[in-house]
Image (cartoon, helix red, strand yellow):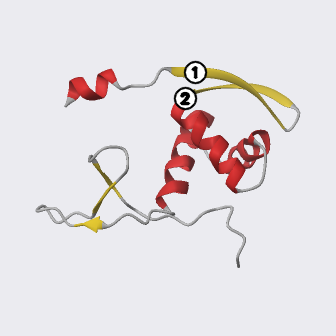
Amino acid sequence: MDQLLRSERSPIIKRSIVIDGHKTSMSLENEFWDALREIANREKTNLAKLVGRIDHERTNINLSSTIRVFVLNYFRSRDTSPVITPMNGSKRSLRAYGTSPILVLPEPNPFQTDK
């Protein structure tokens, strides 16, 4: 399994982005760049504005880590795949990316405005 994970790892890609008029660089795996663009499209915004909103809400971790957590939480909050209970009793969900279960802990979407 470790060999499978190593062979499928995505390289980290460094890109520049302008946030509130300031140019900054971020290093993310290509899958996270793709996910950010998808979220921006879903939220009807552009990538720079989305990253700016994420940046304004972060506390003490670096921007790249904050974005990874945001992307994970964004898609987990929309998870509709069936939840299974493995023998150890923890709640896990099977995802489209193979059959590897990941822990599902729904989080509220900080950009949801249906209040």
Can you give x and y, in whole percent of width and height, for residue 29 in the image? 52, 28
Regarding mark 1 in the picture, which secondary structure is present there?
strand
Label drawn at residue 111? none
Q: Where residue 71 appears, x then y in whole percent?
A: 55, 47
Residue 29, placed above or below residue 54: above
46 displayed left or right of 112: right
Question: Is label 2 in a helix, a strand or a loop?
Answer: helix
Mark 2 crowd level (few <14, some 14–19, many ≥20, 10 Å Cα): some
Identify the residue position indicated by label 2 in the image. 30
Q: Position of residue 59 (x, y in %)?
A: 62, 47
The location of residue 91, given as percent across then percent down, is: 27, 64
CA distance separating discs 1 and 2: 6 Å
What residue appears at the point 40 percent right and 62 percent down from the top-left corner? 105
Contact between marks 1 and 2 (CB within 8 A): the answer is yes
Location of residue 60 by image quarter? top right
Q: Is residue 84 above or below residue 26?
A: below
Tell me which residue sits at (71%, 50%) in the image.
41
Going by the numbered disc 1, the residue's amino acid type is Ile
Residue 13, numbered label? 1
The crowd level at tag 1 (other Cα within 10 Å; few <14, some 14-19, many 20+) is few
